[in-house]
Image: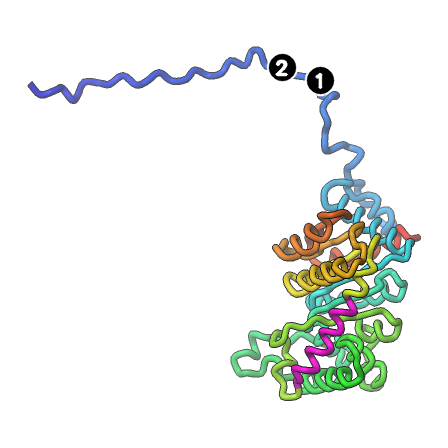
Amino acid sequence: MRPDRTRSIRPPALIPPINVSELKTYPLKKRHSKVRLSDFATPWKRGKSFAAFYAGLPDILAVKTLRAVSRAIVQAHRKRRPVIVGIGAHVIKVGLSPIITDLMERRIITAVAMSGAGIIHDFELALMGHTSEEVDAEIDEGRFGMAEETGRILNEAIVRGAKDGQGLGEAIGRYMSQATDQFPHRATSIVAAGARLGVPVTVHVAVGTDIIHMHPSADGAAIGATSLLDFRRLTAVVAGMEGGVYVNIGSAVILPEVFLKTLSLGRNLGHPISKITTVNMDFLSHYRPQTNVVRRPTQKGGQGYSLTGHHEIMLPLLAAAVLEELG
């Protein structure tokens, strides 16, 4: 006879629910809690000062980081230690040059490093009062990056600077300072402020990434020589930044890589660079800034921080916090 396949099969016994009657508890007042009412925000009242607004922020997460970064900058300034700011070009494009130059004037920012695109927007604003072309509208016709004055004058200044033994940032800054009538808006210029104040402004170029490299006046030897000199000048600043601060704002690749190399070179030459504060500020968290600015440079000492948010909000907020704390 064939087996009866319709006969039901008894399922295995299920594991019974755990008995929780013997659960051990403790009083809530004995537990450590990460959030307290004393840390909460204070509602805004019309007519109050920025100091009241800043004090009324919740002392939680990013606000704690913001305050820690502000204190580190203030402490470095008071002890006359370097405060170095590395910026991507977007920082200039969103209108923050006046914030940076003001902090340079106050001797709070003691050095600025920027990518090659930074000098383009800095230059165009000083020359014409406007910058940032519509790439989507120009690329199809081959017009993107072909503004005549930008390519010609910047390359001329770089070639002249190379002949005079200048760094790239210094070359552009001095060119603007000497041709004052040509740059009616130079008060907005970070490189011009550097030349005027004696604050190092270094430019770190990846050849082929900037529009001026497309122009026939581009001189690879001059670009390379001036940018290499700037790398070594920035290294000299980083070598002396024990107790100082480095803030990377909006550079996802170039400046984090440059900073890590300046740090390694400085340490190789015997400079103590361990008790430092590093900060990455961007509206997205990227691998290289987190690794090469926040983590690796501080793994033998110091502290690394990340502040995530739009530059046009976060940098003015940080600058105001620093100035309030300095009084």
Q: x, y (%) of residue 159? A: 73, 85
Q: x, y (%) of residue 317? A: 79, 55
Determine contact: label 2, label 1, CB under 8 Å. no
Magenta highlight on residue 222: yes
User: Quick one: which residue is furthest to the left in this view?
Assistant: 1
Name the secondary structure under disc 1.
loop
Q: Which image quadrant: the N terminus? A: top left
Q: How many marks?
A: 2
Determine which residue is flagged by label 2: 24
Which segment did they paint magenta? 218-234
Residue 27 - label: 1
- What secondary structure prevails in the magenta region? helix
Q: Quadrant of residue 93?
A: bottom right
Give the class, few, some or many, for how many residues have Cα within 10 Å of label 2's Cα (few <14, many ≥20).
Answer: few
138 vs 273, nearest the viewer: 273
Residue 66 - label: none
How is the model colour-coded? rainbow
Name the secondary structure under disc 2.
loop
Give the class, few, some or many, for how many residues have Cα within 10 Å of label 1's Cα (few <14, many ≥20).
Answer: few
Which residue occupies 71% across, 21% down? Answer: 28
Q: Quadrant of residue 241?
A: bottom right
